[in-house]
Amino acid sequence: MALVVQKFGGTSVGSIERIRSVARRAITAQRAGHRVVLIVSAMSGETNRLLGLAHEIAKVPDAREMDALAATGEQVSAALTAMAIHAEGGVARSLLGHQIKVLTDDAFTKARIVAIEGSKIFEIVDRGEIAVVAGFQGVDARGNITTLGRGGSDTSAVAIAAAIGADECHIYTDVDGVYTTDPNVCPSARKIDRISYEEMLELASLGAKVLQIRSVEIAMKYNVPVHVRTSFSDQPGTIVTNEDSALEGMVVRGVAYDKAEARVHVVGIDDRPGVAAELFEKIAEKNISVDMIVQNVTIDADARAAITFTIAKTDLARGKPWIESVSKGLGAREVRYDEDVVKVSIVGLGMRSHAGVAAKMFRILANEGINIQAISTSEIKVSCLVASKYTELAVRSLHDGFGLAEG
């Protein structure tokens, strides 16, 4: 008797009929002899609606209250799904994050899981019921409702699967697996049957929307095999698992892009040891994550420097006053912002053992007349910041240039 975690995203529970379909799938798995735990997201569009209401009330709403509001979307889905299971002849019980409990830190709107108490889940499944858990949410040490950030239901699912020792973790979504790139941008994109945790981690961090990055981190840490598949058919999807020699032999596995970042350009900052540390320490105090960083020194009478970096667009509004204050304190002449940028990346385990991959990427972009504004690399990825108007051209040219359409 396998212990199975099934997670269903917003599109999969986006209507009453789809919720009924989820209920039937869970009952089928249970009748096949499995103990079943469902993790559900808010109905498609519901989180955006709730956050929209918050921003009508206040330009920058209180983060604690944002979490209390946003978590209600998953609560609705969990209750409706449990009702649907009952209506289909099964038995289910809905659970919220604080009932399990999913203990998190107090970083509202993007909390991190500290621990999960699984006894409540076992209590339900061991008596023959299906546990329906509201994803995306938890509770901090003070009893405040917290949420795990966009895509947090993926994180809930994998973390719960790890905590309860689940045999299988299935992530059901509106796509049938992980693709070599976004099929909406590149028609020649194809589904990947198996991908390593490391590659999936990079793709998720670089803008691929199939899995949330922290869910992949947890899966890799606790060795939880994840099966990404569609909720609209029984076809196999993509297995995210440990790397092997077959996966390592592929130089580039995918192309990702991310339009969710903004470029910040701090001009005329003091050129002395410790300036970058001071700048980014102050930014980190506001819980703002920095991605790509480029520092240039202007050789003039003052020997001033310029630092360019990217942050999430969602952090820009609240971060601007703080960034400008800190930059002014470090002698900066001005701070400029650009939201019309996109980060385009290539990912593959094979980059570790193949030279010239970055040079080939730069040449492909140059041949299309695309100027590179910033570059960052790791062992298995290369990312370039370019003007957002080149998004589709950059993705397609890199995808075809590295032969990803050929299989």
Image (cartoon, grey):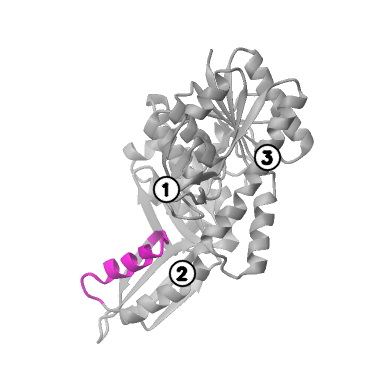
**Of 208 and 365, the residue lying toward us:** 208
* Residue 33 highlighted magenta (yes or no): no
x%, y% of residue 154?
54, 39
| Residue at the disc numbered 3 | 77
**Corner quadrant of residue 75:** top right
First-in-chain label (2 vs 1):
1
Q: Which of marks 2 and 1 is in front?
A: 1
x%, y% of residue 138?
51, 44
x%, y% of residue 31?
66, 14
* Mark pair 2, 1: CA separation: 27 Å
Q: Can residue 211 be seen in this view?
A: no
The residue sitting at 69% across, 44% down in the picture is 43
Residue 51 higher or lower than 39, as above or below: below
| Residue at the disc numbered 2 | 319
Are the residues flagged by discs 2 and 3 in contact, CB closer than 8 Å? no
x%, y% of residue 325?
39, 78
| Residue at the disc numbered 1 | 141
Circle 3 crowding by C-alpha within 10 Å: few under 14, some 14–19, many from 20: many
**Disc 2 on helix, strand or loop?**
helix
* Amino acid type of the residue tagged 2 in the rendering: Gly
Q: Nearer the viewer, mark 1 or mark 3?
A: 1
In the rendered structure, the answer to whether residue 257 lies left or right of residue 353 reads: right
The magenta region covers 271-292
| Quadrant in the picture for the C terminus | top right
Q: Nearer the viewer, mark 2 or mark 3?
A: 3
The residue sitting at 49% across, 64% down in the picture is 315
